[in-house]
Image (spheres, helix red, strand yellow):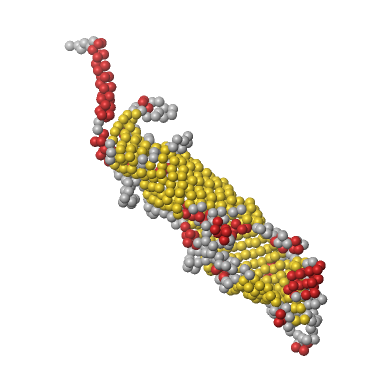
Amino acid sequence: MPHLPLPKSRRAKIVLAAAGLLVAVPAVAIVVLINADWNRARPWLNARTSEALGRPFVIDGDLTLTWQQPAAAPGRHGWRDYLPWPHLQAQNVRMGNPVGITPDPAHPDAASVSRLAFSLNPLALLQQKIVIPELRFDSPDVRLLRGKDGNNNWTFEKQKPDSKWEFQLQSVVFSKGTVYLTDGVTDTAMRADVDTIADSRYGIAWRLAGTYRGAPVKGSGKAGGVLSLQQQGTPFPLQAEMHSGGTMLAIDGTLTRPTQLAALDVLLKIAGPSMAQLYPLTGVLLPETPPFSAQGRLTGVIKRGGGDWVYDKFSGKVGSSDISGKMTFSERKPRNFLTGNVHSRLLQFSDLGPLVGADNRASKEQRGARYLQPAGRVLPVEAFRTERWTSLDADVRYTADQITRDADLPISQVDTHIVLQDSVLSLNPLNFNIAGGTLATQIRLDGSGRTLAGGIAAELKASARHMQIRQLFPRLPPLQASVGQINGDAALTATGNSVASLLGNANGEVKALINGGSISKLLLEEMGLNIGSVVLAKLSGDKQVKLNCMAADFGVTHGLMQTRQFIVDTDDATLHVDGTVNLENERLDLTLRPDSKGVRIFSLRSPLYVKGTFSDPDVSVDKGVLALRAGGALALAAVAPFAALLPLVNAGPGEQSECAALLNQAGRKPVAPPPGKARARQGAKPTTGERAVPR
């Protein structure tokens, strides 16, 4: 029997009933969900969230549910944008620490909040994903922990392969609360109190206090109201200022990917009494300096187990000197690594004093350092802090266009390459353009303890070439007519833990040669005790005497500098210098024997003694050795080893110079006159090769 079509009215009723059922079921479901006791779902939600987070998660208080329409994504207006999302509010929520983190027994949770509110993407649940676009905390108590092994509780690892649920947290909104940081890597224990503020850029403000790297720290700052945790999230604005002792550090910029504390891009301003005091704040080993300030752009990314930081286009002042450049700091194992290029247009010579502990009491007090220099000592006794050399390797190039000092020492174009490798510090080269010439040095300081436990094994090589006398002493007008130049060499090895102890144990040699120039005639007359000429010189004024040559050769043994040869030759006199300079106890013991070449109104000859300490030298005359100038002269030292000074002659004007002639004469074997003729020849100038016996 054929089926008859239903009446239209009946079909309409069926369609309307089906449609009504489709609408009613979700509506009833929503009503049921709204009115359901969601506290019964807490065990399931706690378990699923704990599994997704990889750490314990517990909702201890009430759990309520409302439905809210999510914010539409820019440019999208599909049906998903009109689908309401469940919005949950949970009271008294706690999150524990992951496996491997040992918390404080008194505070076992990583975080706890009085109220937590968040929305869930319902469509993501179908894919076993817990996606929370925004998580809001009321009165959070967060405890960030990092052990000495580098493991921390703020990094959320990817879910394990056997986990069926994935957790995604995209942003966090803070309200008033407290954040604690305990870091075993940097020896840090700090507390920050956080509160919301009304600001066009920042949403929260904070104040902190505690210790960082064992040093007291306090500070304050502001941050964005919404902390983006997405991989490509909006940069999080950040402003902070911290103080540790007299050191100040301020940043203003952005932070992205905060779960890893990465992608920092800020303007960094920094100032303090000494760069060495940055060590507690930064962990970066820097030398002792006068008060400093600098600002530049700091960018960096912290990776697991380390990070890379770049301080670029910085400029500032160290004492009275300017600095600029770029530095890169990399956290590595077994030691961190610092590289960079630093430049100064003008370097004040006195600003170098703190590097070796040679600054005065006022300077040390200004940078908060103890004044350890004993009274009467000149060489710095402050010990090098080699125990810090183990924390860092470094490769830094430093240049300066000009160096000045109070007496306008003309040093320019300083160039040094500083390398610290496995506690061995080298400055190779350390070069200066000075007084129209050059001073090239190489310094190596081994503070590893392999050679000397608790001290430094040092090596120094220095070479001075073509330094012009009149440029070396620009504030002495009598020397401006001089055309002389200085050449010299030094090679020393030493052990110790300060400049004083290193020089006090030094071994090696020091040689210098001055070819041509001028010297005060009055000084020579006083040294020769030519009384009449001294009176005339004082009446008519001092005059300059041509300096033909000065040749000095010292051997150094255990800090004792012994003259091997020391001669000063002028047109008026020849000075022979013998004796020692003790670098260990800073004492002088030199004898200067003048030999006048011309006729004087009333002339006496006596050795001149230079004794005493570096800080208080004493110049005296032995009256018992006075003798009438009846003739004769001091011959040059017997069988003098002047060959050691020939390289300095060759570095100067050459074999035709006055120094070349003097050293050639000094190298001849002296011949003593026959005993019977010694008295007869008094008053006559000795011939070449003869040796006059002084009385």
In the rendered view, tell whether residue 412 sits above or below residue 169: below
- Residue 540 in the image: state x and y as whole percent: 81, 67
Please give left or right for residue 213 compared with residue 116 in the image. Answer: right
Q: How many marks?
A: 0
- Judging depth in this view, the residue of 285 and 515 nearest the camera is 285
User: In the drawing, does residue 100 fall left or right of residue 664?
Assistant: left
Q: Position of residue 553 (x, y in %)?
A: 66, 72
- For the residue pair 434 and 465, the one nearer the viewer reads as 434
On the image, the x and y values in percent for residue 132 come to: 35, 36
Q: Nearer the viewer, residue 203 or 286?
A: 203
Q: Residue at x 31, y 48 (%)?
A: 108
Residue found farthest to the bottom: 676
Residue at 48% x, 52% y: name it: 244
Q: Determine the residue positioned at 76% across, 87% down.
A: 674
x and y percentages locating residue 380 in the rendered image? 57, 65
Question: Residue 663 is drawn in which quadrant?
Answer: bottom right
Location of residue 556 with respect to 324 vertically, above or below: below
Q: Tell me the quarter of the image containing the C terminus.
A: bottom right
Residue 37 sits above or below residue 191 on the image? above
Does residue 556 appear anywhere in the picture? no
